[in-house]
Amino acid sequence: MMALIDNAVYVQGFRTADPADLAETYRVMRGRGGMAWIGLYRPTDEEVRSIAEEFSLHPLAVEDALKGHQRAKLERYGETLVVVLRPAQYVDDAERVDFGELHVFIGRDFVVTIRHAESPDLAGVRRRLEASPELLAMGPEAVLYAILDEVVDQYGPVVAGLENDIDEIEDQLFDGTETVSRRIYELAREVIGFQRATQPLIGMLEGLLRGSEKYEVDDELQRYLRDVLDHALRIADRTGVFRSVLENALTVEATLVAQRQNDEMRRMTELNLAQNEEVKKISSWAAILFAPTLVSGIYGMNFARMPELGWSAGYPLSLALMVAVCAVLWGVFRRKRWL
């Protein structure tokens, strides 16, 4: 299946040809002295190597484009500028940030974009530039600006989605929601991934602006790049705040969990103490009642010869002994505050 999504040759900012294949693109570009803009989506090795051979792309940059899974970066190989971008989309239902990968090769008369994911929508970028021939006439750097602007603009909904989820987490912190710790951790991981995608853009844009004079970048285009840089700085600042808020939220949640555990331990301790008091009372009364039961049990054995059986005062003395023993035991337990 052909990975060539869009392919055109531009002269003075206007689209002058729609070649059917790469070979025709190279031929028309050289013949008309225009700029080729080739858009590829998950191309084959042969297609990438064809472009690399035609435009003398560096082997390391070609290898990165073939393998994918690269970090956001900007590198220059001779006259060719290589930019790797990590566009992002926020999936609200799953509270997940999906990252794409876009490789952009910029030369004096060509732009090659290689996408490894559905985003960003470069067709929209191409339409906007074709509607502004004066901007497109500034050359490949104008295309790079438009792509950077699109990627940074797509970060806006991601920031809004993360901010909304953080607001929900702050509301859940004091509700005792059991899953809030896991949600904080997972969202912090998404924020860190988003930060890794956006933070390098600042250095990349600053590098482009520093090299503007050397590579004769139009002054108007430099102003556009500074505007993108401002947007990237705001996004980086907000992302840094998100990370700090989530770290604080995790600390607060740990504190609240520890407090709830302490409260539970205190309640359990109070319950155990109350149970111990009840056990003491029950044990005390059991001991008090055991004394007369012991005496009456002994004299209930019905032996023929037992002390005091023939003594008329034996019975009242036995009762008195029972009462005395119970009174002494009651006094002892009372002094020990068991009763």
Image: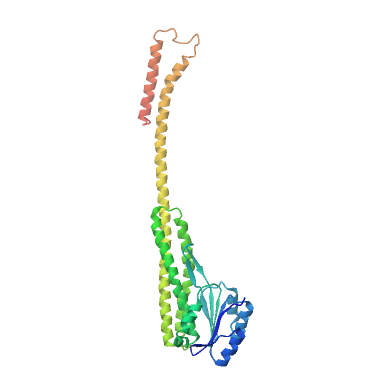
Q: Left of 316 or right of it: where is 19?
A: right
Q: Which of 296 and 13 is in front in this view?
A: 13
- The percent coordinates of residue 54 (x first, y second) are 60, 86
> How many numbered marks appear?
0
| 147 versus 279 height, above or below | below
Q: In which quarter of the image is residue 27?
A: bottom right
Q: Left of 209 or right of it: where is 117?
A: right
Q: State the colouring used for the structure image.
A: rainbow
Q: In which quarter of the image is residue 55?
A: bottom right
- The percent coordinates of residue 291 (x first, y second) are 43, 21
Which image quadrant: the N terminus? bottom right
Q: Which of 124 and 219 is in front in this view?
A: 124
Instruction: Please name the residue shown 47% across and 16% down the image.
Output: 298
Q: Which of 81 and 336 is in front in this view?
A: 81
Find the residue positioned furthest to the right: 46
Q: In which quarter of the image is residue 308?
A: top left
- The percent coordinates of residue 161 (x first, y second) are 43, 66
- The percent coordinates of residue 129 (x first, y second) are 47, 83
